[in-house]
Amino acid sequence: MTRYLILGGGSAGCVLAARLSEVPENDVCLVEAGNDLHPARMPAAIRSAYPGRAYLDIQNIWRHLQAVMHASSQGHRRYEQARLLGGGSAINAMMANRGAPQDYDEWHEMGADGWDWRSCLPYFRKLENDQDHVGKLHGQDGPLRIARPALETLSPFVRSMINTLEHQGYPLKLDQNGAWKDGAYIGAVAMSEGGERIPTSVCYLSEAVRARPNLHIRTRLTVDKVLFEGKRAVGARLVDNGSHAEHVHADRVVVSAGAIHSPALLMRSGIGPSEALASHGIPVVHHLPGVGGNLMEHPSIAVSTFLPKQARTLFPEGHHEQAVVRFSSNLHGCTSGDMHGAILSRSAWHSIGYRLGTLFFWVNKSYSRGRVTLNSSDPALAPNVEFNMLSDPRDLARLKQALTFGACLMKDANMKACSDVIFAASYSPRVASVARPGIWNALQRGTLCGLLEMSGPLRKRLVHSLVTQGVTLEALLNDDAAMTHFVTSNVGGTWHPSGTCRMGKASDPDAVTGADGAVHGVEGLFVCDASLMPSIPRANTNVPTIMIAERIADALKNKKTT
């Protein structure tokens, strides 16, 4: 019988499989719905230092997954979540930041006992191989290589923006994972020495790890539900692409399907709000109302500019998020460093994106909460995802503030040589549609690029008519109602869903698991991924998720089998 059955081979699942199989007596089975992502066979779009193509390939994502960002936004829109071994680490932007120490102290205060910063730091150090910084805050022996781009590789646009930020009181700092302070930072990126992506399916599941006789990696299998005997998890029902089902039994079952699919799997298995389960004809194993709640994201908006030729990157295939700015809103009830701006040397993988520089802002400590619910008990049907972004007025006020801040930076005199037409932007369904590969899209993009290059004084009119569809940044800045409408209608996410199976005490009705990831009210069932986060950290969530998996792996190793 399998000792550990890990359901989901994302950033967390691959870490768990590698660490748990270090013990020869542990028979470990890792199950992934998508394709294997083998160290020796990574597609060029995933391997690339520029990550913009990976999440556009429907072979890499849950193609039918959609989400509602805000009640007034453009309805359901595609929400890209990875469906291949390595999960988010295989298609994300590869940023490797941790968040603020206070984020983890907050987890402890919210009932996740032992998840304070002092206890989490050793696991951040354990996962990383930092090439630039040493000392008590950094590790050099972990699987994940972390480095920063050399200053001479920064694009002229990024250099000018850094200078502008310095003049406005945000000095350049070199260690994004150092002391938590506002400022401009050279971005910390998880890439190989050769400048290629290193998903957890590669850096943790190396050839040597994959060769272990006690590790079994099974891909292209959908998990229907967890199997129970009474209130003890004993395995899972798996379905292949031909609808052939099999039961796999295990001493311990670990759900690592991500913050959207983990709660959906728990609910299909009879763990969740009893009334909701009954409405889908699902027998209730244990009533747990917190499953699927506490859904968190970092709401985003952007300010972009058409780049004159002299401002464009000399390394178009290099990593695009070369620097960031961390700043504080100073809004009542908000913490320090609660806002984040990514400084993009190019805004998309295609020809138009190469000609655009962007300040991509998000609320780094958001307070709005949404929910994941089931549309059906059928695992082939995507769950319902409603982020409810900006429902907390603090989030709306800060995203509007970010838009104003971005406009101020772009219009600064220091940016004159590196900025042309400036406009508000977002990753809208329209933008996403145009970005998809294809002959027709390529023709449209090529035509628009030609017009933008040739238009000269008419370029502003062209951008506002074809790109922004009549919305001007000046109009938004001068009309608060118009800005509110634009932000709520165009708010996007950052692909950082989290919190839907959050850790907390058994007495907390919103908590789903204990501090060890064990699901309340049942035996033998654990969760390990970003869904465990009680509150959202001020960070891209991939590295915190890997840290969580490192800690949960240790906890499982030390837990006796009953």
Image: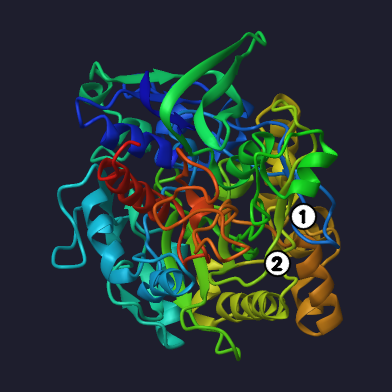
What residue type is disc 1 on?
Val
Residue at 29% over, 77% down: 179
Residue 160 is at least partly visible in this image: no
Q: Nearer the viewer, residue 119 or 417?
A: 119
Question: Label 2: which residue?
Answer: 423
Where is residue 347 shown, x and y percent of the image? 57, 52
Q: Residues within 10 Å of mark 1 (few under 14, many from 20)?
A: some
Q: Nearer the viewer, residue 561 or 244?
A: 561
What residue type is disc 2 on?
Phe
The image quadrant that residue 185 belongs to is bottom left
Residue at 24% over, 42% down: 143
Label 2–label 1 contact, CB within 8 A = yes
Where is residue 283 shown, x and y percent of the image? 73, 34
Residue at 46% over, 20% down: 249
Q: Is residue 300 left or right of residue 540?
A: right
Residue at 76% over, 69% down: 487
Residue 310, compared with residue 81, is above or below; it is below
Secondary structure type for disc 2: strand
Q: Which mark is residue 467?
A: 1
Where is residue 534 shown, x and y percent of the image? 52, 63
